[in-house]
Every structure is written in C-alpha cells, then in structure tokens.
Amino acid sequence: MKTVEFSVQGMTCFGCAQGVQRAVSRHKGVQEAIASNIDKNVIVKYDETLVKDEDITHLIGRLGYQATPVK
Ligand SMILES: [Cu+2]
C-alpha cells in the first residue's frame, strides 16, 4: 500500500470534494480516499500493483479538476 497526496485545482465546495472522494474511492485498487476542498487536495491510499498515480490524476481530470501528485 502506498499513500499519496494529490493537490487538486477547481474543487470550490464540499460537494466537489465529495464527488472526487466518491469516485476515487471506487477506483480499483484504492483502499481509501479523503478529499478536502479547504486543503484543495485528496489523500489516496492504494495498492501500487493495481493503480498508478496517473490513473488517479486521469480519473480526477475526467471529473473536471486538475490533480497533481505532491512529492
Ligand atoms: Cu463544488
């Protein structure tokens, strides 16, 4: 398991964060996702044999937000 913080541009309210959190949580290999419109991020715990950072950034991108892994 790996935990990565992604900074996310464009989540302007709690509803945005909830939508991102729900979608990322449901992605295969993701154990937990916690999104915050206040911190403008989502913290994702996932199995790195099933998911890559890029899969998460693409998923969030399809929802209309720009995500970048924080190294
Ligand atoms: Cu919103």
Image (tube, grey):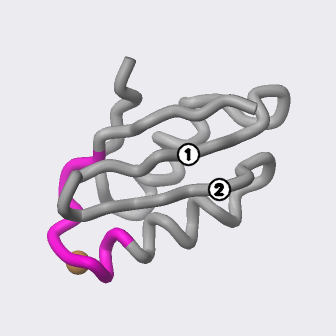
Q: Do the residues labelled 2 and 1 touch (CB within 8 Å)?
A: yes
Q: Position of residue 43 (x, y in %)?
A: 47, 46
Q: Earlier in the sequence, mark 2 or mark 1?
A: 2
Q: Is residue 44 left or right of residue 6?
A: right
Residue behind mark 1: 44
Q: Could you tell me which residue is drawn at 35 percent across and 41 percent down?
A: 67
Mark 2 crowd level (few <14, some 14–19, many ≥20, 10 Å Cα): some
Coordinates of residue 14 in the picture (x, y in percent): 27, 78
Q: Where is residue 63? Give x, y as percent.
A: 41, 63
What span is in magenta? Answer: 8-17
Residue bearing the label numbered 2 = 32
Residue at 78 percent of width and 53 percent of height: 28
In the image, residue 60 above or below residue 5: below
The answer to if 13 sits in the magenta stretch is yes
Does residue 32 sit above or below 18 in this rendering?
above
Any mark on residue 63, and which? none
- At a point 48% along the width and 59% down the height, the residue shown is 34
